[in-house]
Amino acid sequence: MDLPSHLSQHDRAAQLPLVTKDARVTLAEPMDRNRNDEVLSALRDQIAAVGERSWLADADEGSTYRWDDLFERLRAAGASDARLDRIETLAERFDRPYPSLLRLRVKADVDIDFAPGQYVTLRVGDTPRAYSLANSPTEDELEFCIRLVPGGRLTSDLFEHVDVGDRVVVRGPNGHMVLDPPSRRDMVFLATGTGVAPFKSMIDYTFETGRDVVDGDPRHVWLFLGCGWEDDLPHREHFRRLDAEHDHFHFVPTLTREPLLTDWEGETDYVQSVFVTHVAEDALANARLPERLAGARKQAPKSGVDARIDPSNVELYACGISAMVSTLVRAARSVGVPDSEMQYEGFG
């Protein structure tokens, strides 16, 4: 599938129009949390099921753990592959740098006009990188949602060195994934990770400008957002507030790893499967689902949302890692969303 991609823009980023020479950082704050105490507690519980809690302390080297030694000991004790996978996932979370998810706001010296869904190129020093704008164009600052990529061209500098008051350069805007004109169609947004950034811009603008109501009738606005852990959900409290304020806005997070740490009772499957479970039954009855989604036809949603999606009456947007977006688009097609009503963008 040929996906429009941020990645394809990186090589030409330096040639984009120079919008401002003087943009200053006004906010740089983590959106994730340091959860190492929770992770260690969960690790001890997993280890105790096949051995002794003290095995974790035996592998402690201060700042990290001798994971290979611990896994060898667990295998010798007969730990199942499933349990070893859970312990490995927790170990990876423990070793993850903190912060790994950054909210960055920038004030430019000129007004930057952009359409919700577009991106700009942010340059720190000599390194440019394309990032989607996460704020509504009605605001006078630019907001970014940035995931740390260890060794990445720009993200390491942003996380380690950028602070309030620092200067950056902004080029653009660019991008063709923008809102359709208001219609009676409902709106469905499918995202993974920081792919939700352009959708925050679109959703905020939709509600700020009254595009959520057409001819007096509210449009259902759905946001399906998939991540591993709850604190990986960008702008989660913002979306939860919108959900509480508007009966026709449905925030459906799905977390594949969170149950390893907490008693998370929400969705845990991949975004495409969770989306399918929220499609109206009559549409699913005639859907030609891929084999890997067939089981979703019989699954009841865990989101608590009573509304259902009529795929013939939506405009759908998808964004995230390119391989995942391809899967999301195929799922949307399989339940009957017309190609003419889909926009999508991949990166990475």
Image: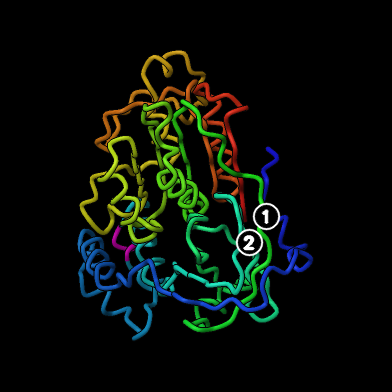
- Colour pattern of the rendering: rainbow
Q: Are marks 1 and 2 in contact (CB under 8 Å)?
A: yes
Question: Callout 1: 10 Å neighbours few (<14), some, many (20+)?
Answer: some
Foreground: 314 or 229?
314
Quadrant location of the N terminus?
A: top right
Dot label at residue 174:
1
Q: Secondary structure at mark 2?
A: strand
Residue on which disc 2 sits = 120
User: Which amino acid type corresponds to the residue marked 1 in the rendered image?
Assistant: Asn
Residue 30 coordinates in the image, percent (x, y): 39, 71
Q: Residue at x 41, y 66 (%)?
A: 92
Residue 7 coordinates in the image, percent (x, y): 68, 57
- Dot placed on the residue nearer the N-terminal end, 1 or 2: 2
Quadrant housing residue 304:
top left
* 73 falls in the magenta region: no
Total numbered circles: 2
Q: Residue at x 58, y 24 (%)?
A: 338
Quadrant location of the C terminus?
A: bottom right
Quadrant housing residue 74:
bottom left
Give the magenta-colored segment's residue range.
Answer: 74-78
Q: Residue at x 27, y 34 (%)?
A: 305
Question: Callout 2: 10 Å neighbours few (<14), some, many (20+)?
Answer: many
Quadrant housing residue 236:
bottom left
Residue 160 coordinates in the image, percent (x, y): 50, 82
Foreground: 324 or 74?
324
* 77 falls in the magenta region: yes
Horizontal side of residue 142 vs 13, given as left or right? left
